[in-house]
Amino acid sequence: MFVDEAKIWVKAGDGGHGCVSFRREKFVAKGGPDGGDGGKGGDVYFLASQEIDTLVDFAGKHHWRAKNGMPGEGSNKAGAGGEDLVIKVPVGTIVYDTDIDMMIKDMDTPGMEVRIVRGGRGGRGNKSFASSTNQAPRMATDGKVGQERNLRLELKLIADVGLVGLPNAGKSTLVSRSSHARPKVANYPFTTLEPVLGIVELPGFRRFVMADIPGLIEGAHDGAGLGHDFLKHIERTRILLHLLDIQPDDNSDPVGNYHKIKNELAMHSKTLAEKPEIIAVNKTDLDPDGEYTQDIIDRLGVDGVMGVSAVTGEGLDELNEKLWRVVKGKEE
Ligand SMILES: Nc1nc2c(ncn2[C@@H]2O[C@H](COP(=O)(O)OP(=O)(O)O)[C@@H](O)[C@H]2O)c(=O)[nH]1
Ligand SMILES: [Mg+2]
Protein backbone atom coordinates (compact mmCIF):
# COMPACT_ATOMS: atom_id res chain seq x y z
CA MET A 1 0.00 0.00 0.00
CA PHE A 2 1.29 3.42 -0.91
CA VAL A 3 0.09 6.78 0.19
CA ASP A 4 -0.58 9.25 -2.58
CA GLU A 5 -0.53 12.78 -1.31
CA ALA A 6 -1.39 16.31 -2.42
CA LYS A 7 -1.45 19.72 -0.78
CA ILE A 8 -4.00 22.28 -1.90
CA TRP A 9 -5.52 25.59 -0.92
CA VAL A 10 -9.26 26.09 -1.20
CA LYS A 11 -11.10 29.38 -1.00
CA ALA A 12 -14.83 29.99 -1.00
CA GLY A 13 -16.20 32.99 -2.88
CA ASP A 14 -16.51 36.37 -1.20
CA GLY A 15 -19.94 37.86 -0.73
CA GLY A 16 -20.88 40.71 -3.08
CA HIS A 17 -21.13 44.19 -1.56
CA GLY A 18 -24.46 45.78 -0.79
CA CYS A 19 -25.40 48.71 -3.01
CA VAL A 20 -26.26 52.31 -2.17
CA SER A 21 -28.75 53.64 -4.66
CA PHE A 22 -31.83 55.88 -4.80
CA ARG A 23 -34.78 55.67 -7.11
CA ARG A 24 -34.63 58.14 -9.94
CA GLU A 25 -37.89 58.66 -11.68
CA LYS A 26 -39.32 61.44 -13.74
CA PHE A 27 -41.11 64.01 -11.61
CA VAL A 28 -39.93 62.40 -8.36
CA ALA A 29 -37.51 64.85 -6.80
CA LYS A 30 -35.98 62.47 -4.36
CA GLY A 31 -36.67 58.77 -4.70
CA GLY A 32 -36.40 56.25 -1.88
CA PRO A 33 -33.44 53.91 -1.33
CA ASP A 34 -33.32 50.97 -3.75
CA GLY A 35 -29.81 49.47 -3.38
CA GLY A 36 -29.95 45.68 -3.44
CA ASP A 37 -28.04 43.16 -1.33
CA GLY A 38 -24.87 41.50 -2.56
CA GLY A 39 -24.94 37.84 -3.57
CA LYS A 40 -23.45 35.08 -1.43
CA GLY A 41 -20.04 33.70 -2.40
CA GLY A 42 -19.88 30.15 -3.73
CA ASP A 43 -19.02 27.23 -1.43
CA VAL A 44 -16.36 24.63 -2.14
CA TYR A 45 -17.43 21.00 -1.94
CA PHE A 46 -15.58 17.71 -2.21
CA LEU A 47 -17.34 14.91 -4.04
CA ALA A 48 -16.12 11.33 -3.63
CA SER A 49 -16.02 10.03 -7.20
CA GLN A 50 -15.24 6.64 -8.66
CA GLU A 51 -14.21 8.32 -11.90
CA ILE A 52 -10.79 9.14 -10.51
CA ASP A 53 -8.42 6.89 -8.67
CA THR A 54 -5.38 8.97 -7.78
CA LEU A 55 -4.51 12.46 -6.59
CA VAL A 56 -2.40 13.15 -9.66
CA ASP A 57 -4.80 15.84 -10.87
CA PHE A 58 -3.95 17.90 -7.80
CA ALA A 59 -0.22 17.84 -8.40
CA GLY A 60 -0.38 20.56 -11.02
CA LYS A 61 -3.14 22.66 -9.47
CA HIS A 62 -2.80 23.87 -5.92
CA HIS A 63 -5.32 26.70 -5.82
CA TRP A 64 -9.02 26.01 -6.03
CA ARG A 65 -11.59 28.74 -5.58
CA ALA A 66 -15.32 29.17 -5.90
CA LYS A 67 -16.79 32.27 -7.56
CA ASN A 68 -17.48 35.50 -5.70
CA GLY A 69 -21.01 36.81 -5.26
CA MET A 70 -22.00 39.80 -7.41
CA PRO A 71 -22.63 43.22 -5.85
CA GLY A 72 -26.16 44.43 -5.38
CA GLU A 73 -27.53 46.97 -7.85
CA GLY A 74 -30.07 49.77 -7.99
CA SER A 75 -33.75 49.08 -8.52
CA ASN A 76 -33.57 46.59 -5.63
CA LYS A 77 -31.59 44.14 -7.67
CA ALA A 78 -29.78 41.61 -5.52
CA GLY A 79 -26.40 40.47 -6.77
CA ALA A 80 -26.22 36.92 -8.13
CA GLY A 81 -24.74 34.29 -5.85
CA GLY A 82 -21.28 33.01 -6.79
CA GLU A 83 -21.19 29.54 -8.30
CA ASP A 84 -20.17 26.69 -5.99
CA LEU A 85 -17.07 24.71 -6.85
CA VAL A 86 -17.42 20.93 -6.65
CA ILE A 87 -14.06 19.18 -6.64
CA LYS A 88 -14.00 15.48 -7.40
CA VAL A 89 -11.68 13.42 -5.23
CA PRO A 90 -11.10 9.67 -5.39
CA VAL A 91 -13.18 7.55 -3.04
CA GLY A 92 -11.01 6.87 0.02
CA THR A 93 -9.39 10.30 0.14
CA ILE A 94 -8.71 11.52 3.65
CA VAL A 95 -8.78 15.28 4.09
CA TYR A 96 -6.58 17.05 6.63
CA ASP A 97 -6.58 20.72 7.56
CA THR A 98 -2.89 21.52 7.84
CA ASP A 99 -3.41 24.81 9.69
CA ILE A 100 -5.04 23.13 12.65
CA ASP A 101 -3.29 19.82 11.98
CA MET A 102 -6.48 17.79 12.06
CA MET A 103 -8.26 15.19 9.99
CA ILE A 104 -11.51 16.75 8.90
CA LYS A 105 -13.08 14.17 6.60
CA ASP A 106 -12.77 10.66 5.31
CA MET A 107 -14.32 10.60 1.83
CA ASP A 108 -14.99 6.88 2.04
CA THR A 109 -18.37 6.54 0.31
CA PRO A 110 -18.98 6.99 -3.42
CA GLY A 111 -21.17 10.00 -4.08
CA MET A 112 -20.47 11.54 -0.68
CA GLU A 113 -20.50 15.34 -0.90
CA VAL A 114 -19.07 17.55 1.81
CA ARG A 115 -18.83 21.31 2.10
CA ILE A 116 -15.23 22.16 2.87
CA VAL A 117 -15.42 25.97 3.00
CA ARG A 118 -18.39 28.29 3.06
CA GLY A 119 -18.85 31.32 0.84
CA GLY A 120 -19.14 34.77 2.41
CA ARG A 121 -22.57 36.27 2.97
CA GLY A 122 -23.53 39.13 0.67
CA GLY A 123 -23.54 42.69 2.08
CA ARG A 124 -26.81 44.55 2.72
CA GLY A 125 -27.95 47.20 0.28
CA ASN A 126 -29.17 50.55 1.56
CA LYS A 127 -32.79 49.62 0.86
CA SER A 128 -32.63 47.17 3.77
CA PHE A 129 -31.55 49.93 6.16
CA ALA A 130 -34.59 52.09 5.47
CA SER A 131 -36.82 52.68 8.48
CA SER A 132 -39.42 55.19 9.60
CA THR A 133 -36.73 57.33 11.18
CA ASN A 134 -34.21 56.94 8.38
CA GLN A 135 -35.96 56.99 5.07
CA ALA A 136 -32.89 57.75 3.00
CA PRO A 137 -30.09 55.64 4.45
CA ARG A 138 -26.73 55.95 2.73
CA MET A 139 -25.38 52.88 4.38
CA ALA A 140 -24.67 49.50 2.91
CA THR A 141 -22.37 46.74 4.14
CA ASP A 142 -19.57 44.87 2.41
CA GLY A 143 -19.86 41.23 1.56
CA LYS A 144 -18.12 38.85 3.95
CA VAL A 145 -14.88 37.24 2.87
CA GLY A 146 -15.20 33.56 1.92
CA GLN A 147 -13.49 30.96 4.10
CA GLU A 148 -10.15 29.57 3.02
CA ARG A 149 -8.26 26.50 4.13
CA ASN A 150 -4.97 24.75 3.55
CA LEU A 151 -5.54 21.06 3.06
CA ARG A 152 -3.59 17.89 2.69
CA LEU A 153 -5.22 15.04 0.81
CA GLU A 154 -4.15 11.50 1.38
CA LEU A 155 -5.12 8.42 -0.57
CA LYS A 156 -4.06 4.86 -0.01
CA LEU A 157 -3.11 3.49 -3.38
CA ILE A 158 -2.90 -0.13 -4.35
CA ALA A 159 -0.48 -0.78 -7.16
CA ASP A 160 -2.15 -2.97 -9.74
CA VAL A 161 1.03 -4.25 -11.30
CA GLY A 162 4.22 -4.94 -9.36
CA LEU A 163 7.45 -5.28 -11.31
CA VAL A 164 9.91 -8.02 -10.54
CA GLY A 165 13.15 -8.87 -12.25
CA LEU A 166 16.88 -8.83 -11.70
CA PRO A 167 18.71 -5.53 -11.45
CA ASN A 168 19.23 -4.09 -14.94
CA ALA A 169 16.33 -6.04 -16.43
CA GLY A 170 14.88 -2.64 -17.36
CA LYS A 171 12.21 -2.15 -14.69
CA SER A 172 12.86 1.55 -14.14
CA THR A 173 13.07 2.17 -17.86
CA LEU A 174 9.77 0.39 -18.41
CA VAL A 175 7.91 2.36 -15.74
CA SER A 176 9.14 5.68 -17.03
CA ARG A 177 8.43 4.75 -20.63
CA SER A 178 4.92 3.37 -20.03
CA SER A 179 3.54 5.79 -17.53
CA HIS A 180 2.82 9.45 -17.94
CA ALA A 181 1.84 10.54 -14.47
CA ARG A 182 3.64 9.94 -11.22
CA PRO A 183 1.63 9.99 -8.02
CA LYS A 184 3.47 11.77 -5.24
CA VAL A 185 4.18 8.94 -2.87
CA ALA A 186 4.40 9.80 0.80
CA ASN A 187 5.33 7.89 3.90
CA TYR A 188 7.09 5.00 2.26
CA PRO A 189 9.03 3.07 4.83
CA PHE A 190 12.18 2.75 2.77
CA THR A 191 15.10 4.83 3.79
CA THR A 192 17.28 4.73 0.72
CA LEU A 193 15.15 2.88 -1.80
CA GLU A 194 12.04 4.59 -3.02
CA PRO A 195 9.22 2.79 -4.77
CA VAL A 196 8.33 4.41 -8.05
CA LEU A 197 4.70 4.39 -9.06
CA GLY A 198 3.53 5.21 -12.53
CA ILE A 199 0.05 5.55 -13.92
CA VAL A 200 -0.25 3.78 -17.23
CA GLU A 201 -2.93 5.37 -19.37
CA LEU A 202 -4.73 3.56 -22.15
CA PRO A 203 -7.22 4.85 -24.72
CA GLY A 204 -10.76 5.21 -23.39
CA PHE A 205 -9.80 6.63 -19.99
CA ARG A 206 -8.54 3.28 -18.79
CA ARG A 207 -5.61 3.22 -16.46
CA PHE A 208 -3.74 1.21 -13.91
CA VAL A 209 -0.95 1.79 -11.43
CA MET A 210 2.43 0.16 -11.97
CA ALA A 211 5.01 -0.09 -9.20
CA ASP A 212 8.74 -0.53 -9.38
CA ILE A 213 9.61 -1.57 -5.87
CA PRO A 214 13.32 -1.76 -5.23
CA GLY A 215 14.73 -4.33 -2.91
CA LEU A 216 14.04 -7.64 -4.56
CA ILE A 217 17.16 -9.40 -5.65
CA GLU A 218 19.56 -6.63 -4.71
CA GLY A 219 19.49 -8.02 -1.18
CA ALA A 220 19.08 -11.64 -2.14
CA HIS A 221 22.29 -11.59 -4.12
CA ASP A 222 24.25 -10.58 -1.03
CA GLY A 223 22.59 -13.39 0.86
CA ALA A 224 20.50 -10.88 2.74
CA GLY A 225 17.30 -12.34 1.39
CA LEU A 226 14.29 -10.39 0.30
CA GLY A 227 13.62 -7.13 2.00
CA HIS A 228 10.66 -7.28 4.32
CA ASP A 229 9.31 -4.00 2.99
CA PHE A 230 9.60 -5.20 -0.53
CA LEU A 231 7.54 -8.29 0.23
CA LYS A 232 4.93 -6.35 2.12
CA HIS A 233 4.42 -4.00 -0.79
CA ILE A 234 4.66 -6.45 -3.64
CA GLU A 235 2.17 -8.79 -1.93
CA ARG A 236 -0.44 -6.08 -2.16
CA THR A 237 -0.22 -5.62 -5.89
CA ARG A 238 -2.83 -7.41 -7.97
CA ILE A 239 -0.50 -8.99 -10.46
CA LEU A 240 3.20 -9.30 -11.14
CA LEU A 241 5.04 -8.34 -14.27
CA HIS A 242 8.21 -10.39 -14.44
CA LEU A 243 10.75 -8.71 -16.66
CA LEU A 244 13.59 -10.75 -18.14
CA ASP A 245 16.75 -9.28 -19.56
CA ILE A 246 17.44 -10.86 -22.94
CA GLN A 247 21.15 -10.26 -22.49
CA PRO A 248 22.20 -10.07 -18.83
CA ASP A 249 25.53 -8.37 -18.13
CA ASP A 250 26.85 -11.46 -16.39
CA ASN A 251 25.95 -13.64 -19.38
CA SER A 252 23.59 -15.68 -17.25
CA ASP A 253 20.71 -17.48 -18.94
CA PRO A 254 17.46 -15.46 -18.90
CA VAL A 255 15.44 -18.63 -18.40
CA GLY A 256 17.59 -19.66 -15.46
CA ASN A 257 17.19 -16.17 -14.00
CA TYR A 258 13.44 -16.44 -14.33
CA HIS A 259 13.33 -19.64 -12.29
CA LYS A 260 15.74 -18.25 -9.75
CA ILE A 261 13.48 -15.30 -9.01
CA LYS A 262 10.33 -17.42 -9.10
CA ASN A 263 11.82 -19.77 -6.50
CA GLU A 264 13.03 -16.90 -4.40
CA LEU A 265 9.55 -15.37 -4.36
CA ALA A 266 7.82 -18.69 -3.70
CA MET A 267 10.19 -19.45 -0.84
CA HIS A 268 9.32 -16.24 0.90
CA SER A 269 5.64 -15.89 0.27
CA LYS A 270 2.77 -18.14 -0.70
CA THR A 271 0.77 -15.07 -1.70
CA LEU A 272 3.41 -14.12 -4.22
CA ALA A 273 3.75 -17.62 -5.59
CA GLU A 274 0.03 -17.69 -6.34
CA LYS A 275 -0.26 -14.22 -7.78
CA PRO A 276 -1.13 -13.94 -11.48
CA GLU A 277 2.02 -13.23 -13.40
CA ILE A 278 2.85 -11.93 -16.82
CA ILE A 279 6.29 -12.48 -18.26
CA ALA A 280 7.92 -10.12 -20.70
CA VAL A 281 11.30 -10.55 -22.35
CA ASN A 282 12.88 -7.10 -22.46
CA LYS A 283 15.47 -5.53 -24.79
CA THR A 284 14.18 -7.15 -28.00
CA ASP A 285 15.88 -4.30 -29.85
CA LEU A 286 19.11 -6.22 -29.25
CA ASP A 287 17.61 -9.15 -31.17
CA PRO A 288 16.29 -7.67 -34.41
CA ASP A 289 15.35 -10.95 -36.10
CA GLY A 290 13.65 -12.22 -32.92
CA GLU A 291 15.30 -15.62 -32.96
CA TYR A 292 16.86 -15.40 -29.55
CA THR A 293 13.65 -13.99 -28.04
CA GLN A 294 11.69 -16.89 -29.48
CA ASP A 295 14.19 -19.36 -28.07
CA ILE A 296 13.75 -17.92 -24.58
CA ILE A 297 9.98 -18.01 -24.91
CA ASP A 298 10.07 -21.62 -26.11
CA ARG A 299 12.34 -22.71 -23.28
CA LEU A 300 10.18 -20.95 -20.69
CA GLY A 301 7.31 -23.12 -21.83
CA VAL A 302 4.71 -20.67 -20.50
CA ASP A 303 1.84 -19.26 -22.54
CA GLY A 304 1.49 -15.57 -23.31
CA VAL A 305 5.11 -14.45 -22.88
CA MET A 306 5.71 -11.19 -24.74
CA GLY A 307 8.78 -9.59 -26.20
CA VAL A 308 9.20 -5.87 -25.55
CA SER A 309 11.75 -3.12 -25.70
CA ALA A 310 11.44 -0.60 -22.89
CA VAL A 311 13.87 1.62 -24.76
CA THR A 312 12.26 1.74 -28.21
CA GLY A 313 8.73 1.15 -26.93
CA GLU A 314 8.25 -1.87 -29.16
CA GLY A 315 5.53 -4.18 -27.82
CA LEU A 316 4.65 -1.91 -24.90
CA ASP A 317 1.15 -1.03 -26.10
CA GLU A 318 0.28 -4.71 -26.42
CA LEU A 319 1.84 -5.47 -23.04
CA ASN A 320 -0.10 -2.70 -21.32
CA GLU A 321 -3.36 -3.81 -22.91
CA LYS A 322 -2.71 -7.30 -21.64
CA LEU A 323 -1.81 -6.08 -18.17
CA TRP A 324 -5.00 -4.05 -18.06
CA ARG A 325 -7.13 -7.04 -19.03
CA VAL A 326 -5.55 -9.22 -16.36
CA VAL A 327 -5.76 -6.49 -13.72
CA LYS A 328 -9.46 -6.06 -14.46
CA GLY A 329 -9.98 -9.80 -14.33
CA LYS A 330 -10.87 -10.10 -17.99
CA GLU A 331 -8.11 -12.58 -18.68
CA GLU A 332 -5.97 -14.99 -16.70
N1 LIG B 1 18.93 -2.06 -25.36
C1 LIG B 1 18.08 -1.93 -24.37
N2 LIG B 1 18.49 -1.53 -23.15
C2 LIG B 1 17.59 -1.40 -22.17
C3 LIG B 1 16.21 -1.66 -22.37
N3 LIG B 1 15.56 -1.43 -21.20
C4 LIG B 1 16.50 -1.04 -20.32
N4 LIG B 1 17.72 -1.02 -20.90
C5 LIG B 1 18.99 -0.63 -20.28
O1 LIG B 1 19.30 -1.55 -19.24
C6 LIG B 1 19.92 -0.88 -18.15
C7 LIG B 1 19.15 -1.14 -16.86
O2 LIG B 1 17.87 -0.57 -16.96
P1 LIG B 1 17.03 -0.19 -15.67
O3 LIG B 1 15.71 0.30 -16.15
O4 LIG B 1 17.79 0.71 -14.80
O5 LIG B 1 16.88 -1.61 -14.98
P2 LIG B 1 16.31 -1.97 -13.52
O6 LIG B 1 17.50 -2.19 -12.66
O7 LIG B 1 15.55 -3.24 -13.72
O8 LIG B 1 15.46 -0.85 -13.06
C8 LIG B 1 19.97 0.58 -18.53
O9 LIG B 1 21.24 0.86 -19.06
C9 LIG B 1 18.92 0.70 -19.60
O10 LIG B 1 19.18 1.74 -20.50
C10 LIG B 1 15.80 -2.07 -23.68
O11 LIG B 1 14.61 -2.31 -23.97
N5 LIG B 1 16.75 -2.21 -24.62
MG1 LIG C 1 15.71 0.26 -11.30
Image (tube, rainbow, N blue to C red):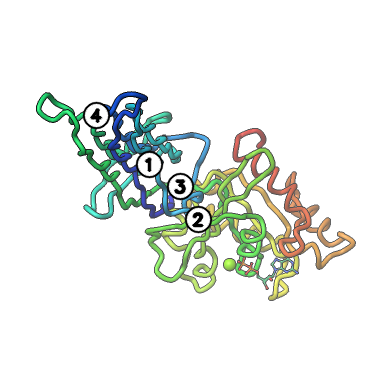
At 53% from the left and 69% from the top, the residue drawn is 218
Question: Which one is nearer the viewer's eye here, 179 or 280?
Answer: 179
Q: Is there CB contact under 8 Å for labels 2 and 4?
A: no
Q: Residues within 10 Å of mark 4 (few under 14, many from 20)?
A: many
Q: In the image, what residue type sits under mark 1?
A: Asn
Quadrant location, ligand no. 1: bottom right
At 43% from the left and 71% from the top, the residue drawn is 192
To which residue does mark 4 refer? Answer: 127
Q: In the image, what residue type sits under mark 4?
A: Lys
Q: Residues within 10 Å of mark 1 (few under 14, many from 20)?
A: many
Q: Is there CB contact under 8 Å for labels 3 and 4?
A: no
The reply to whether the residue tagged 4 has its Cβ within 8 angstroms of ligand 2 is no
Q: Kindly state the secondary structure of the residue where label 3 is placed.
A: strand
To which residue does mark 3 refer? Answer: 157
Q: Choose the circle earlier in sequence order: 2 or 1.
A: 2
Q: Kindly state the secondary structure of the residue where label 1 is placed.
A: loop
To which residue does mark 2 refer? Answer: 60
Q: Nearer the viewer, mark 3 or mark 1?
A: 1
